[in-house]
Image: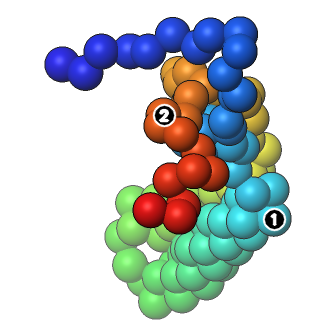
């Protein structure tokens, strides 16, 4: 098990990559894709419920599709509004550089 190293006041604090917040544009793009996918499934369910109801399919087939077409917009909106927390330093500590710093470059 690796030993954790304490940060001393005379050493510089370096931002850990794992504690950096996620890119907001990437997060929003992912949420938009999930929303569009869910609404696409909803559209397919709606069209499927109309087609199955008019073709004489059992009530539970078109009923299930119609119920999904009604519920999926709510699910899509809840998923879009679910934002990951952006707290800096989640479950991590500052990383302190080891060694001589710039002197090591010339070696």
* Quarter containing the C terminus: bottom left
Which quadrant of the structure image shows residue 41? bottom right
* Residue 96 in the image: above or below residue 6: below
Label 1 to label 2, Cα distance in Å?
A: 34 Å
Q: Which residue is mark 2?
A: 98
Judge depth for marks 1 and 2 and give the one in front: 2
Which quadrant of the structure image shows residue 68? bottom right
Q: Which residue is mark 1?
A: 25
Is residue 79 visible in the rendered structure shown here? no
Query: Which residue is at 57% across, 81% downward?
Result: 44
* Residue 95 in the image: above or below residue 43: above
Query: Which residue is at 60% across, 39% downward?
Result: 16
Residue sitting nearer the eye, 89 or 30: 89
Q: Are marks 1 and 2 in contact (CB under 8 Å)?
A: no
* Residue 89 in the image: above or below residue 61: above
Residue 17 location, x and y as percent? 59, 46
Is residue 30 visible in the rendered structure shown here? yes
Q: For the image shown, how many numbered marks are present on the structure?
A: 2
Query: Which residue is at 61% across, 25% downward?
Result: 94
């Amino acid at each position: 098990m690796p030993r954790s190293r304490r940060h001393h006041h005379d050493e510089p604090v370096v931002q850990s990559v794992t504690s950096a917040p996620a890119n907001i544009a990437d997060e929003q793009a992912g949420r938009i894709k999930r929303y569009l996918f869910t609404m696409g499934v909803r559209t397919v369910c709606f069209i499927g419920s109309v087609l199955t109801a008019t073709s004489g399919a059992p009530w539970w087939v078109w009923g299930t599709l119609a119920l999904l077409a009604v519920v999926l917009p709510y699910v899509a909106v809840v998923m879009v509004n679910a934002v990951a927390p952006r707290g800096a330093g989640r479950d991590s500590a500052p990383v302190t550089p080891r060694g001589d710093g710039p002197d090591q470059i010339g070696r």
